[in-house]
Amino acid sequence: MKQTPDLSTAAWRKSSYSDGGDNNCVEVAGGCPGLVPVRDSKVRDGKVLVFGPAAWALFTAQVKR
């Protein structure tokens, strides 16, 4: 089983597609080579999904379509 990297100092940013509210935001952390950590902004201490860069790029491309 793979473990989530230490993200205690990660720089999280909200999705540019957020409507600006606090109720439906996805945050992504940068600075994690080879990983794209994603979390719900409402549950900052909750679980984090971690994607590979290729999978995240494919996902975001499909969302934009």
Image (cartoon, helix red, strand yellow):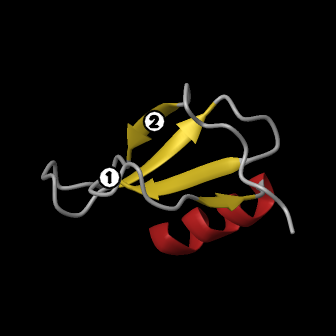
Q: What kind of element bears circle 2?
A: strand
Q: Amino acid at mark 1?
A: Ser
As helix, strand or loop, the secondary structure at mark 1 comes to loop
Q: Residue at x 71, y 60 (%)?
A: 51
Question: Label 1, on which residue?
Answer: 41
Taking depth in this image into account, of 7 and 54 the one nearest to the observer is 7
| Residue 20, x across and y down, in percent | 16, 48
**Sooner in the amino-acid sequence: mark 1 or mark 2:** 2
**21 with respect to 49 (left or right):** left
Extreme residue toward the left, this view: 21
Q: Residues within 10 Å of mark 1 (few under 14, many from 20)?
A: some
Q: Amino acid at mark 2?
A: Trp
Q: Is residue 35 left or right of residue 44?
A: right
C-beta proximity under 8 Å, tags 1 and 2: yes
For the residue pair 7 and 57, the one nearer the viewer reads as 7
Provide residue 1's location: percent of width, then percent of height. Answer: 87, 69
In this figure, which residue is indicated by the disc labeled 2?
12
